[in-house]
Image (cartoon, grey):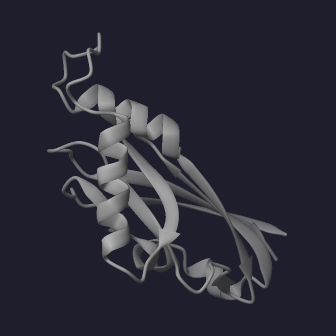
Amino acid sequence: MSWSQRTLQLAPMSRGWHLVTGEVVGAMPELAETDCGMLHLFIQHTSASLSINENADPDVPHDLEASLNAIAPEDFPYRHTLEGPDDMPAHVKNSLLGCSLSIPVSKGRLTLGTWQGIYLVEHRDRAGGRRLVLTLHGS
């Protein structure tokens, strides 16, 4: 069993759901040599999230974004407002979706389902780049 860890710096993205499966796989070349293992992803931010969801129909990310905006609207009477109206809703959305994922690895590949992809979900209107820590454990 071995461990590998990488940091993946993603460019700034607009608010919404961004498929990053390719970037994650590209940042961890050791995946190709892993017969059996686990890839753990962690985002080092509290106003963006990680999610695994459908990657085939472009309406899905749009509907997910609309749903999250309905659950955590910017016009809710939040107390934490110093960083702008999109900041506290971003923290709520991060708490709902989460900051980490664990994905099994088999025969050199992530064992995502046919229609699954890894998404970086940006909750801010004008965020900077986001940093992910990728940790692979396997043989």
Question: Image check: 131 left or right of 83?
Answer: right
Q: Is residue 47 visible?
A: no
Nearest the eye: 80 or 6: 80
Write down the quadrant of residue 11 in the picture.
bottom left
Q: Where residue 118 appears, x then y in whole percent?
A: 48, 68
50 over 54 or under it: above or below: above
Q: Where residue 78 appears, x then y in whole percent?
A: 29, 15
The number of numbered badges drawn on the structure is 0
Write down the quadrant of residue 106 in the picture.
bottom right
Question: Image check: 18 left or right of 53?
Answer: left
Which residue is pictured at 57% across the width and 50% down the height? 100
3 over 117 or under it: above or below: above
Nearest the eye: 60 or 26: 60
Instruction: Spot the residue most to the right.
Output: 1
Q: Where residue 71 appears, x then y in whole percent?
A: 38, 37
Where's the N terminus, which quadrant? bottom right
Q: Is residue 5 visible?
A: yes
Nearest the eye: 3 or 76: 76
Which residue is pictured at 70% across the width and 86% down the height? 33
Nearest the eye: 134 or 122: 122
93 over 139 or under it: above or below: above
28 over 121 or under it: above or below: below
Which residue is pictured at 54% across the width and 74% down the height? 28
Where's the C terminus, which quadrant? bottom right
Q: Where residue 82 appears, x then y in whole percent?
A: 19, 15
Question: Image check: 2 left or right of 123?
Answer: right
